[in-house]
Amino acid sequence: MTRQQARLHIWRELGLASGNAMVTAGYVNDRIDRGQRMVALKTRWMEGTGSTQCTAGTAEYNLPTQRMFYVQFVQHKNRKLEYTTERDLYRDDESWRTQKGVVLKWYQPDATRVGLWPKPTAGSGGTLRFWSCMTPTLVSSDTAALATPSQYHDSLIYFVCAESMERLSEQDADGRKQSRFLAKAEGEIALLK
């Protein structure tokens, strides 16, 4: 399915002949890109790996590509590290940022970096490998095909419709139209798992 076909399908589902002042082609195109990312996260259809070199004394590393999001696990020297949070590390020991030793855990301080605890010591460098969901490439033109596999196209359409309902303000007072689109999207994903 191309971006243009998806956009026309979305407008039909919303009961629009074509875009209007609130749900323009640009708005729908942006939502299609966001929807592809959401479907990728919910279905894990686009997983990837990457690696970077680990050096002594360095606790935080940039992810090897900006397309990575939702890191699932990290390996250091072919050993899977345990996930933790900065909050848990701080709760256990307030001096956790200064500790050095054999790397045992990983945390994610923000969307673009991964941290290690304790900091690696001299000689304990090596390769960090990341497994994560990947962000699909943005659709660059109306004739370009969507990155989302065809079995998830309906879910993508319904996610975009649900977001568009907020913009249109056509939902009834309790938001049933929007809820119906979200339920349809979730149902499509559940059927395919």
Image: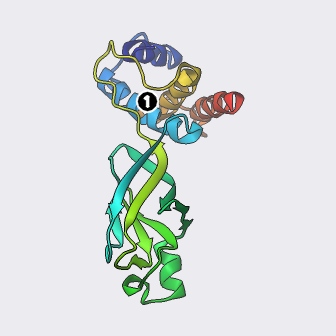
Give the position of the C terminus as an image quadrant. Answer: top right
Task: Report if residue 112 is visible in the image.
Answer: no
Q: Which residue is mark 1?
A: 168
Task: Report if residue 143 is visible in the image.
Answer: yes
Query: Hey, which residue is sitting farthest front in the picture?
Result: 123
The amino acid beneath tag 1 is Leu
111 left or right of 45? left
Depth check: give the residue in front, 80 or 109: 80
Q: Return the x and y of residue 191 as percentages of the image width and height.
A: 71, 28
Q: Residue at x 44, y 41 (%)?
A: 134
Residue 175's place in the image compared with 160, above or below, is below
Q: Return the x and y of residue 69 as percentages of the image width and height.
A: 43, 48
Q: Return the x and y of residue 159 as percentages of the image width and height.
A: 52, 31
Query: Hey, which residue is sitting farthest right in the picture?
Result: 191
Residue 134's place in the image compared with 70, above or below, is above
Q: Secondary structure at mark 1?
A: helix
157 left or right of 192? left
Q: Residue at x 39, y 77 (%)?
A: 119
Q: Residues within 10 Å of mark 1 (few under 14, many from 20)?
A: few
Depth check: give the residue in front, 91 or 8: 91
